[in-house]
Image (cartoon, rainbow, N blue to C red):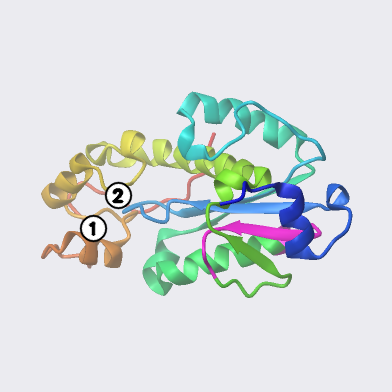
Amino acid sequence: MPRFRIGPYISSTFDVEDWRAFRLCGMDEVGRGAYAGPLVAAAVVLPPRFRHPLLRDSKLLTARQREEVDVVIRRRAVAWAIAEVSVDDINLRGLGWANIDIFRRLVDLVQADGYCCDGKLRINASQPVHCLVGGDSKVPAVSAASIIAKVYRDAIMRRVHEEAPHYNWASNKGYGAREHRTAIREHGPHALHRRVFLASVLQTDLDLGSVGAGAGAATSAAPA
């Protein structure tokens, strides 16, 4: 396969001659496969010729590396925004809806000449959005979005960990680690769990209509 190059990608996808002057907004989400916590996505427009040795897909970085480059991206980006979809909305309207709606909202929050979203979605937004499989490892602005979304959501999960530490969200960030699944079976689901998703993934006979013993009511949370 030919090597991916950002210039030809922008020129061919968005039909522009001078791709260097094109303000590309990269978008990515984090938390789609989690059992608990909100869905978070970010949008970033990087300045021309932006470089950083740690700018890559957030999954390839350590937590410390992500936090380091997150500060740089927020300071130097032309524009950036973060959006959340709450657990209540995911439980009510579904994860598929949430994964589309969050990008629609980001398009309205960030002004750019074009929008690139990681993945394979159909997003009917106020501006056209091109979805690119592997975009988080190919397009610098999408890599940047993946980083700040991940740092933001991880901070949320560390905070809500204090409400119900037996799920160990500070470590697993709401994903399906064995300790997390075991705690759900022992204590029942928390108000911050995606209940319908849990029912299909775990295939248990939990009473998902009630909050488990010792679990508190859901509260809104933002990183410190």
Task: Identify which amino acid the numbered label 1 is placed on.
Answer: Val
Which stretch did the figure color magenta? 108-121
User: In the drawing, does residue 37 fall left or right of residue 22?
Assistant: left
Where is mark 2, residue-wise? 216
Q: Is residue 115 magenta?
A: yes
Above or below — where is 135 with respect to 63? below
Q: Residue at x 14, y 45 (%)?
A: 182
Residue 194 spot, x, y in % from top left:
32, 60
Residue 103, quarter of the rendered image: bottom right
Badges 1 and 2: C-beta atoms under 8 Å apart?
yes
Above or below — where is 123 with respect to 31? below
Residue 126, quarter of the rendered image: bottom right
User: In the drawing, does residue 118 fall left or right of residue 169?
Assistant: right
Residue 139 spot, x, y in % from top left:
65, 47
Image quadrant in which the C terminus is located: top right
Disc 1 residue crowd, few under 14, some 14–19, many 20+, Cα 10 Å? some
Q: Element type at marker 2?
A: loop
Residue 85 spot, x, y in % from top left:
50, 60
Q: Residue at x 88, y 49 (%)?
A: 21
Q: Residue at x 40, y 71 (%)?
A: 94
Residue 192, quarter of the rendered image: bottom left
Q: Residue at x 54, y 31 (%)?
A: 66
Where is mark 1, residue-wise? 211
Tell me if I can see residue 110 in this picture: no
